[in-house]
């Protein structure tokens, strides 16, 4: 049977996350973004969700993807990278999305430099998962599945 479009989860990766595995492995680990996305797809499949992935180096690309998810995708998982801390246009785009939004970070930004302590995404997210390294994304898929099940 064809999957209903209400089960699509958009997974957004912001700037520099394409360099995961090479970039500061002592902070972000040695898994590549593809490794993380493979685990996301596996978890989603088990939970009956369909994944759409966008990896972007600018807020503009992420915002375009969010606009296209409106009235089409059921939920959004987003690791905005450093845009987390200042990109109010990203905040506004996410505010226009009506489904669950889970903010994800591999590291725990609140234990790092002070400029990372504020998230402009958190006020428009259903919740934030941060600091669990390679498990963060998988936890986010489970969080989305729980939130979507509650909406039914
Ligand atoms: C990050 C945390 C951000 O502060 C940082 O700019 C990143 C990665 C994380 O996943 O831990 O690029 O979002």
Image (cartoon, rainbow, N blue to C red):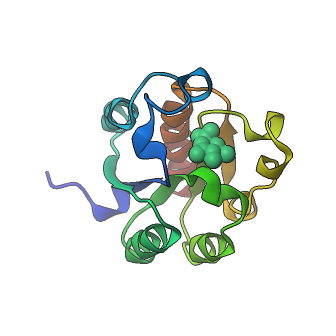
Residue at the farthest left position: 1
Judge whether residue 104 can be spotted in this image.
no
Q: Which residue occupies the foreground of this view, 15 or 1?
A: 15
Q: Ligand 1 sits in which quadrant? A: top right
Q: Is residue 106 visible?
A: yes
Image quadrant of residue 5?
bottom left
Q: Residue at x 57, y 55 (%)?
A: 80
Place of residue 121 in the rendered image (x, y in percent of width and height, measured from the top left): 68, 61
User: Exactly how many numbered labels are in the figure?
Assistant: 0
Residue 71 vs 129, above or below: the answer is: below
Nearest to the observer: residue 50 or residue 133: 133
Residue drawn at point x = 49 percent, y = 57 percent: 76
Residue 145 position (above or below residue 100): above
The structure residue drawn at horizontal position 42% and vertical position 70%, both measured from the top left corner, is 61
List the single residue furthest toward the right.
114
Q: Is residue 2 above or below residue 31?
A: below
Q: Position of residue 39 (x, y in %)?
A: 37, 29
Indicate left or right for 119 with 54 as reference: right
Q: Residue 42: percent from the left, percent from the top?
A: 32, 31
> Is 113 located above or below residue 11 in the figure?
above
Residue sitting at x 58%, y 50%: 81
State left or right for residue 129 relative to residue 11: right
Residue 20 placement: quadrant: top left
Image quadrant of residue 107? Answer: top right
**x, y percentage for residue 50?**
30, 49
Q: Is residue 2 or residue 14 the one in the foreground?
A: 14
């Amino acid at each position: 049977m064809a999957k209903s479009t209400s089960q699509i989860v958009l997974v957004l990766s912001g700037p520099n996350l394409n360099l995961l595995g090479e970039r500061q492995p002592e902070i972000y680990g040695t898994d590549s973004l593809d490794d993380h996305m493979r685990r996301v797809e596996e978890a989603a499949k088990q939970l009956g969700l369909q994944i759409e992935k966008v990896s972007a180096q600018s807020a503009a690309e992420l915002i375009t993807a969010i606009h296209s998810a409106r009235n089409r995708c059921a939920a959004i998982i987003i690791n905005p990278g450093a845009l987390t801390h200042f990109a109010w246009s990203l905040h506004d785009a996410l505010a226009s999305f009506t489904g669950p939004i889970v903010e994800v970070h591999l590291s725990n930004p609140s234990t790092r430099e002070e400029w990372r302590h504020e998230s402009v995404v958190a006020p428009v997210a259903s919740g934030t998962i941060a600091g669990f390294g390679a498990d963060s994304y998988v936890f986010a898929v489970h969080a989305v599945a729980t939130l979507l099940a509650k909406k039914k």
